[in-house]
Every structure is written in structure tokens, then in C-alpha cells.
Amino acid sequence: MPHSELNASQIPRKARRKGFAYDVFLSHNAKDKPVVRELAERLKQDGLRVWFDEWVIPPGDSIPLKIEQGLEQSRTLILVMSQNAFVSEWVALERHTVLFRDPTNAERRFIPLLLDDTEITDTLKQFAYIDWRQKTQEQYTRLLAACRPAVSGARSARERRRQSPAVKFFREHIGPIDFVAVTADGRRAVSSSAAKMVRVWDLETGRRFTTLRGHTDVVWGVAVTENGRWVVSGSDDRTVRVWDLKTGQCLTTLRGHTDAVYGVAVTADGQRAISSSADQTVRV
């Protein structure tokens, strides 16, 4: 898999302003994928937002571009060290670590993970690593603790959820969920995600009501009109779309922004939409 080098100046405005979309990015050689997939599933089950290529790169998408975006949006890089990686593409894989090894970049973490008995390169010997040759619970606990973002209070979100049996979970999204809006009557929730779509949920049943498809890139902001008839969404594809909440049809596409649209809002009468963009403008 090809990779590209990244430096701190290339971090997009959305990553600096909004925080990280992923807790973990798994950088690995394709031949190690079965082991890495198992680790990705385990981290995901423990509540982490994991960037794993199979989950976030659909057929037809640019692999180098998606990798660059994933690195930009990730808090922690796990670099899988193995004989397969050293032999075929270690130089490319190691380039990923430049941004994460920067001592001035305190918000990011870099974690080497040793998969087999291969010799660690000189540039990485200075870093403490996770020994994944035996896959022990002790090593996994160390890895999980290092990858988890800081949480406030003594209990994690997972612990709080276990003590809240009335909470419903909506699990169909692939990738991080960026924004959620709720209709005024409290019957529907609307969520945006990195999967280029908007999902509408029935809050009483906990089931998906409909999916709004049409954006060609990450969907950031969503808003619902007070009458519950329309949904407005903004995307990295530089457009704002207006949807019929009942039918799921896109009623119109608003164009004019020259960069990603991060936030949207609607007026109380439902006649105006307001959008904010990385092009440094707000449009009505």
C-alpha cells in the first residue's frame, strides 16, 4: 500500500479545530492484515475509534488520499513492526511516524508494536514499544491505556453506559459520527458521518428510519427545521444539501463555498440555512 509523508504544517484546519476523528490509526503491511484486523476489532470493541483501511476505504477511492486523511484525523499512530514490513515497504511506513514523533506535537501519540522477532530500526529503538509477539493481556492493557483519550471523572464512558440500561445504541455507522441533531418533537435523530451519508433514526424503536445519500465526501454539520420537515447538511464536498425528512430525497444542493462546509444551522421559520466553511466565509 503506498503512503505519503506528512508534516505538522499539513494538518488541516478541521483537525486542529474540531479534535480528532479517530483515536487510533493502524499502519501496517498488507501481509500482516489478519493479525492487525483482529487487533482492530478488539480495540473497537473497547470503545476506540479505529482507522483500519478495510473499514474506511471503499472500492474506487484513492488509497493514498484516504491514508493521508486518516493520518491527519488520528490522535494515535500504531506502527506495526514486522519482517513483512521491513522487507517490502518499511521506508514508506516509517514516513507515517514523522508527524507523530514530533516532540512539539503533544496532542498526538506514537506507539510502535512489535509483531515478530524482526530487528527494530535505529530510528525507532528510542521508543518504548508494545510486544505483540505473544499477544498477552498485559501488553494489550498497556496498549489500550496508551490509546485511550483522556476522560473526565473516575469512570469511563463505557462504565457509565453499563449503568444506564435505558440508553439505546445506534450502531450502523461506519467510521466516526461527527454531528447529531434531534427533531423538535423528539421522535427522530439525524447523524452525520465520515461515510458520506446522513442517517435518520427512530428514537422510540432505536432503528434506522432512512439514509440520506448524495454527498461525495465526509458530512460534517446537520440541522433540522423546527417543523421537522427538512434536514440541512454540510460536507467536505463543499456543498450544502436540503433533504425531505419523510421521503429521504434531496430537494436541492446549495453551491458556492470553495472549501469544506463544517457547520450548518436553520432559522426558526425554516426559510433560511446558514453555513460555515473552511473558506473563511459564512453564507446564508
Image: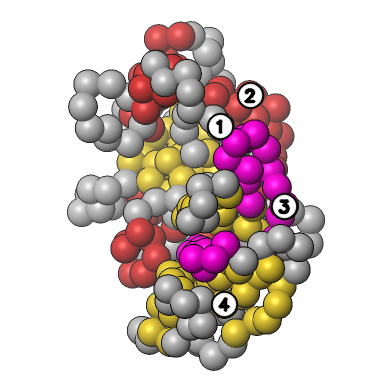
* Label 4 sits on residue: 240
Image location (x, y in percent) of residue 67: 57, 56
246 over 101 or under it: above or below: below
Q: Nearer the viewer, residue 151 or 209?
A: 209
Q: CA distance from mark 4 to mark 1?
A: 28 Å
Mark 3 or mark 4: name the one nearer the start of the chain. Answer: 3
Q: Nearer the viewer, mark 3 or mark 4?
A: 3
51 over 137 or under it: above or below: below
Colour mapping used in the image? secondary structure
* Label 3 sits on residue: 210
* Label 2 sits on residue: 38
Q: What is the three-letter code of the residue carrying label 1?
A: Phe
Q: CA distance from mark 3 to mark 4?
A: 19 Å
Q: CA distance from mark 4 to mark 2?
A: 38 Å
Which residue in the rendered view is the most extreme toward the bottom? 256
Q: What is the three-letter code of the residue carrying label 2?
A: Glu
Q: Residues within 10 Å of mark 1 (few under 14, many from 20)?
A: few
Point out the stretch of residues depicted in magenta.
Answer: 200-228
Image location (x, y in percent) of residue 113: 46, 28
Determine if residue 187 is in view: yes
Secondary element type, mark 1 = loop
Determine if residue 235 is in view: no
Q: What is the three-letter code of the residue carrying label 3?
A: Thr
